[in-house]
């Protein structure tokens, strides 16, 4: 029971991350590289919490097996601490720049891990990172603070990166990045002077949970009017598909006669039409597509998996849902579609995909294949 109270923060934090991991997996919420990076952070944080518990559990137990275990788990902990920091910097960098090539050039910010590895190699001959005494009790090495300083520098770099690119982020996100960076650093400094205090990684776990909500869920991912994915999130999803060289389908939807509704009934009614249509789009497509609003009265659907694209089937499905809607103004609008499947054999980019479905949508518009025409057939 005494050990439980010593490790209880880590145990509760681990349970919290298990719940978060369950939510992410059951929601099938790992749809772009940003989410994949975040998923890895969750799993890695869980592993660190367990390793830290095990490192302390064997400390002071003077048997041959416990000595080996204590040494191994402390080596892992020293390597994993800078690696977790590198994952956070990588995640923030990608949220800002959206470039995997940029991350590769920066070695995914693993320089602190490399430095820690060098310290541990030296530690084999001279205990610069840590040592175990005759009673198998852990002692910090005289150079370990250099590794920690390297880690703190990388974490603080995320704040500089966020402030420097503040136009790409909301004020709320910048404040959270600063908070996420500074609080673990402060607690780590306290742990340097309070031997036996186990708190840093539990605090990081709590930060990861808040980061998921504030950055991935409530950040720039949601369109404020409709609740659909925002244009920024659409770009992230599309970038992830392109970088993974996946086969997927894209549908661009444009509303006909929407300006007439705004002019005749006012913008408040126009907003209600957009909100109602968004609910219709979710009912019709959310199982197969990520539904996004890219601006004004234009929407973009990106398939979650490779799918057979039958444009008339998808059009008819939407028209049926519109007919069942309780808002009579929805019956006044028309729908134009532009759709295409992109596979790995095509040399496509995010811009070329959007240009192509936009072109197809305008072709459909010119042929007048929309709901208004179908009502009169």
Image (cartoon, helix red, strand yellow):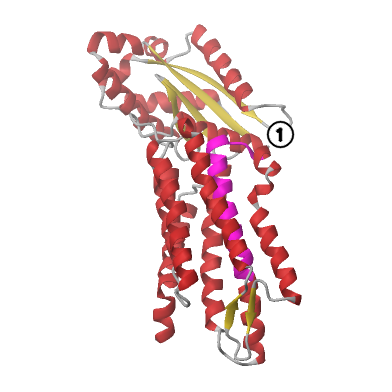
Q: Mark 1 highlights which residue?
A: 344
Q: Residues within 10 Å of mark 1 (few under 14, many from 20)?
A: few
| Nearer-the-camera pick, 322 or 159 | 159
Q: Position of residue 93 (x, y in %)?
A: 56, 42
Q: Is residue 320 magenta?
A: no
**In what quadrant of the picture does the N terminus appear?**
bottom left
Residue at x-position 65% and y-position 29%? 342
Quadrant in which residue 134 is drawn: bottom right
* Total number of numbered discs in the rendering: 1
**In what quadrant of the picture does the C terminus appear?**
top left
State whether residue 367 is above or below residue 45.
Answer: above
Q: Is residue 79 magenta?
A: yes
Q: Position of residue 195 (x, y in %)?
A: 48, 77
Residue at x-position 40% and y-position 86%? 2
| Nearer-the-camera pick, 149 or 206 | 149
Left or right for 154, reference 284: right
Residue at x-position 41% and y-position 13%? 374
Magenta highlight: main SS = helix
Q: Is residue 247 visible?
A: no
State whether residue 164 is above or below residue 2.
Answer: above
Q: Is residue 279 visible?
A: yes
Q: Position of residue 167 (x, y in %)?
A: 46, 30
Left or right for 274, reference 168: left
| Nearer-the-camera pick, 289 or 221 | 221
Residue at x-position 67% and y-position 44%? 106
Label 1's element? loop
Left or right for 121, reference 69: right
Highlighted magenta segment, given as a residue range: 76-100
Quadrant in which residue 277 is drawn: top left
């Amino acid at each position: 029971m005494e050990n439980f109270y010593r490790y209880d923060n880590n145990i509760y934090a681990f349970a919290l991350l298990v719940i978060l991991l369950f939510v992410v997996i059951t929601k099938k919420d790992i749809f772009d590289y940003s989410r994949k990076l975040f998923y890895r952070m969750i799993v890695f944080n869980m592993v660190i919490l367990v390793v830290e518990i095990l490192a302390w559990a064997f400390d002071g137990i003077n048997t041959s097996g416990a000595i080996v275990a204590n040494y191994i788990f402390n080596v892992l902990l020293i390597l994993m601490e800078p690696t977790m920091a590198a994952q956070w910097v990588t995640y923030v960098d990608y949220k800002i720049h959206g470039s995997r090539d940029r991350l590769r050039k920066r070695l995914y910010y693993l320089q602190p891990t490399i430095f820690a590895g060098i310290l541990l190699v030296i530690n084999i001959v001279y205990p610069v990172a840590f040592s175990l005494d005759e009673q198998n009790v852990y002692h910090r090495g005289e150079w370990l603070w250099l590794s920690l300083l390297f880690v703190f520098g990388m974490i603080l770099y995320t704040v500089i990166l966020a402030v420097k690119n503040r136009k790409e982020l909301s004020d709320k996100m910048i404040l959270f990045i600063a908070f996420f960076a500074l609080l673990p650093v402060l607690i780590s400094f306290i742990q340097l002077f309070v031997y036996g205090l186990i708190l840093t990684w539990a605090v990081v776990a709590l930060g990861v949970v808040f980061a998921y909500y504030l950055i991935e869920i409530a950040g720039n991912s949601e369109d404020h009017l409709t609740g659909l994915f925002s244009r920024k999130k659409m770009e992230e999803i599309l970038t992830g598909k392109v970088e993974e060289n996946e086969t997927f389908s894209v549908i661009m939807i444009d509303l006909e006669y929407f300006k007439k509704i705004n002019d005749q009934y006012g913008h408040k009614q126009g907003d209600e039409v957009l909100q109602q249509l968004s609910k219709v789009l979710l009912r019709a497509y959310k199982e197969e597509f990520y539904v996004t609003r890219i601006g004004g009265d234009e929407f973009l659907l990106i398939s979650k998996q490779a799918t057979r694209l039958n444009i008339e089937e998808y059009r008819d499905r939407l028209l049926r849902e519109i007919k069942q809607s309780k808002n009579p103004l929805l019956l006044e609008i028309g729908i134009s579609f532009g759709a295409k499947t992109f596979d790995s054999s095509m040399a496509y980019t995010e811009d070329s995909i959007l240009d192509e479905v936009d072109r197809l949508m305008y072709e459909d518009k010119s042929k007048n294949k929309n709901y208004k025409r179908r009502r009169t057939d």
